[in-house]
Amino acid sequence: MKIEGIYGYKPVITKLGFSKRGMIDLYLKDGRIISFPKNLFSDLKKLTPKQLHRWYLIGGEGFYFDDCNEVFHIEQILGKYDDYKYRFVNEPQEKYRKKN
């Protein structure tokens, strides 16, 4: 049996948008748009509309804002927190150092 739909696609963020007040839209590489209320995250609730528009992507997997100390990961938005938490804790730091 062939599995159809979005099964097996890794979600990759290409941009953020703000189509409705209080909502954040994540545009994914595969064409999906995931919208979520910013009030689900206490740090995002504090940001003004102007502050929200100063966002940056991190490798298509996360994003952050100039005026916020937290980095947000796609898995937090999808409700799969256990899939990413502490992902880098036990990995050797050499893996992330720039090679000469």
Image (cartoon, rainbow, N blue to C red):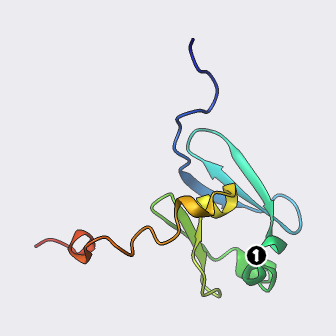
Left or right, 71 with reference to 52: left
Residue 18 occupies which quadrant of the picture? Answer: bottom right
Q: Can you name the residue that lies furthest to the right here?
A: 21
Residue 19 occupies which quadrant of the picture? Answer: bottom right
The residue drawn where x is 10% and y is 73% is 100
| Helix, strand or loop for disc 1 | loop
Residue 51 occupies which quadrant of the picture? Answer: bottom right
Examine the rendered structure and indicate whether residue 93 appears above or below residue 84. Answer: below
Picture coordinates of residue 90, whole percent (x, y): 34, 73
Is the N terminus in the top left, top right, bottom left or bottom right quadrant? top right
Examine the rendered structure and indicate whether residue 1 appears above or below residue 28. Answer: above
Tell how many labels: 1
The residue drawn where x is 80% and y is 77% is 49
Q: Can you name the residue that lies furthest to the top here?
A: 1
Picture coordinates of residue 81, whole percent (x, y): 62, 63
Left or right, 62 with reference to 39: left
Which amino acid, by three-letter code, is at mark 1?
A: Phe
The residue to which callout 1 is attached is: 41
Left or right, 76 with reference to 57: right
Left or right, 82 with reference to 32: left
Picture coordinates of residue 44, whole percent (x, y): 75, 79
Examine the rendered structure and indicate whether residue 7 appears above or below residue 90. Answer: above
The residue drawn where x is 65% and y is 88% is 67
Answer few, some or many: residues within 10 Å of disc 1's Cα (few below 14, many 20 plus, some between 14 and 19).
Answer: some
The residue drawn where x is 60% and y is 87% is 69
